[in-house]
Image (cartoon, rainbow, N blue to C red):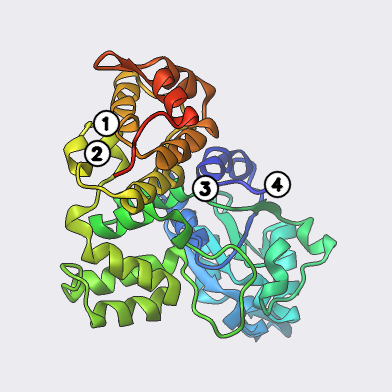
Amino acid sequence: MAVDFATFSNIVHHVTNVRKPVLLRGRHGIGKSTVVYQFADKMGLPVVERRASQMTEGDLVGLPTIEDNSTRFNPPDWFKTACDKPVVLFLDEVDRATIEVRQGIFELTDSRKLNGHTLHEDTLVFAAVNGGEHGSQYQVGEMDPAELDRWTVFDVEPSVEDWLNWAKDNSVSDITWDFINQNRMHLEHSDDYEPNKVYPSRRSWERLDGCLRQANLLEEASPTLYTLTSAFVGFEAAVAFNDFVQNYDRQVTVEDILVHGKLNMVADFGINDHTALIDKFEAAECFKEELEQDQVDNLARYFITLPSEVAMKLWSVLGNGEIENTIKLHQSQVDGESVSDYLVKILAGDTDTSN
């Protein structure tokens, strides 16, 4: 069963408290490394990171010397650090390592030792791979049952909220944050990948945002903005993002309607504009939790202004969420007119609601 990062962060300490190694398994660019560093920061421990895919056997076990007619392996500096003091030892891309390196890691995860050198008792071991159910899409080696048995394996599938919460705390621009919040399907690609095609990921959006902020290119849509965005996150996301930037000043958010009741912002909307806004309601999953009464009141005021076909689209989106929201809206009244009567008129075709 896959877990999001919030769940992982809440339970992983139960594993590290007994000094068992942790393996995060999931798609590329979702933030596996970031969540390891966040955990280390929470624990007050430095991170010693090594990419197993770039290691040789000597990089892992060290080089031999002769002492008193016996061979002794001197540990590499990074492993000596993990033996001398508490750290988070993070081995990335383990499933891309050579079989010799993986056999050495086998000993490390099994006994917390390498060639007679023992990890500090408070050092914690983490690793990350792209395998699991997504392994067929990557050039990685399969981890056999005996290898996996040495790890505590977490299949991670972070939620959009995981990224949005992280982005708020890490200087991602408001415009990029708003775009992802309102266009969640563009955060990352979750289906099979076509060879040689650029797709968006959480990591690529972070890198794109940093590039655009440094170059001051987020003020308006431009060919340069489109070209750079396409290079980072692919064609489809670039088209949507460029259009979003172009119209950012007149963007209406879910919060504008539900929280602030700014109906003046949609006074000149046509059917396509309302449809796009309702898509934002759906993407934001704002009806999954029960709304406050003032939010229901704002929603009711918006609902009775909608063209009939768009009103029914909103009603359908509402129906996929918390049932109490549907009940409350159905019972609402706006300036003496009930939403339930308005629905009856729409269904009977007795009202002209076209804009």
Mark-to-mark CA distance, 1 and 4: 35 Å
Q: Nearer the viewer, mark 2 or mark 4?
A: 2
Q: Position of residue 184 (x, y in %)?
A: 44, 54
Which residue appears at 58% of the width and 62% of the height? 190
x, y percent for residue 68: 69, 82
Q: Measured from the top left, where is residue 134 in percent x and y? A: 68, 65
- The residue shown at (48%, 54%) is 35
Q: Which residue is mark 2?
A: 256
Q: Which residue carries the number 4 mark?
A: 1
Crowding at dot 1, Cα within 10 Å, few <14 / some 14-19 / many 20+, comes out as some
Label 3 residue SS: helix
Q: Is residue 135 above or below residue 159?
A: below
Disc on the earlier residue, 2 or 3 = 3
Q: Is residue 348 above or below residue 25?
A: above
Q: Are marks 2 and 4 in contact (CB under 8 Å)?
A: no
Closer to us: 250 or 226: 250
Looking at this view, is 265 or 89 the one in front?
Answer: 265
Secondary structure found at label 2: helix
